[in-house]
Image (cartoon, rainbow, N blue to C red):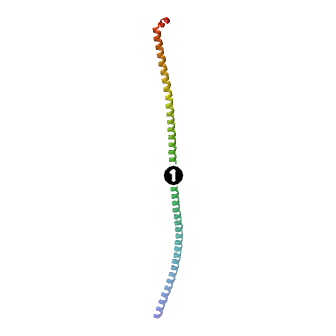
């Protein structure tokens, strides 16, 4: 009976071990399923990250292109401002030169006109003195010849 007790104990131990192995196999199956799901999720996350990285790279490229376009636009704007400033300066210089030419011409015409006026004034002054001198001579002659007494 001792052998039978030992054999029963071994059978019991084997049955317990079989049950434990069966339970461990079930747990290992669940662990395998969990690992597969984690791998799938990891693959999905890596795909999402790849998509996001490509979008970030695209956005970075777009930002670079927009910055370059903005710089070109700024340069063009500055160039146009410089051109307009130069055109304005040229136009102002042309107007200044035209105005100075007009003023010089006006001065020349004014000098000629003033010289003509001064000539006429000298002629009138000469005539005035001739008339005053003639009148004085006539009055002197008349006073000497007593012609004034006849009129008086």
Residue sitting at 47 percent across and 9 percent down? Answer: 142
Q: Position of residue 148 (x, y in %)?
A: 48, 7
Does 88 appear above or below 73?
above
Which residue is at 46% across, 91% downward?
A: 6
Relative to the observer, which residue lies in front, 91 or 27? 91
In the displayed structure, 60 sits above or below 100; it is: below
Q: Nearer the viewer, residue 74 or 38?
A: 74
**Can the viewer see residue 135?**
yes
Residue 32 percent coordinates (x, y): 52, 78
Picture mark count: 1
Q: Residue at x 48, y 19 (%)?
A: 128
Q: Secondary structure at mark 1?
A: helix
Measuring 48% from the left and 87% from the top, which residue is drawn there? 13
Q: Residues within 10 Å of mark 1 (few under 14, many from 20)?
A: few
Q: Position of residue 81 (x, y in %)?
A: 51, 49
Q: Is residue 45 above or below residue 131?
A: below
Please say whether residue 1 is visible from this viewpoint.
no
| Between 90 and 45, the one nearer to me in the picture | 90
Report which residue position mark 1 lands on: 79
Nearer to the camera, 48 or 94? 94
Place of residue 49 in the rendered image (x, y in percent of width and height, measured from the top left): 52, 68
Judge whether 10 appears above or below 56 on screen: below
């Amino acid at each position: 009976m001792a052998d039978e007790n030992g054999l029963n104990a071994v059978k019991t131990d084997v049955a317990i071990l079989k049950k434990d192995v069966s339970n461990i196999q079930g747990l290992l199956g669940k662990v395998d399923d969990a690992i597969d799901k984690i791998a799938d999720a990891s693959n999905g996350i890596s795909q999402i990250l790849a998509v996001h990285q490509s979008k970030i790279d695209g956005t970075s490229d777009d930002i670079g292109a927009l910055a370059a376009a903005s710089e070109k636009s700024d340069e063009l704007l500055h160039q146009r401002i410089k051109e307009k400033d130069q055109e304005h300066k040229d136009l102002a210089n042309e107007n200044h030169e035209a105005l100075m030419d007009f003023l010089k011409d006006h001065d020349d015409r004014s000098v000629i006109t003033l010289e003509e006026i001064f000539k006429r004034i000298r002629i009138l002054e000469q005539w005035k003195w001739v008339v005053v001198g003639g009148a004085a001579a006539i009055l002197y002659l008349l006073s000497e010849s007593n012609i004034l007494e006849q009129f008086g």
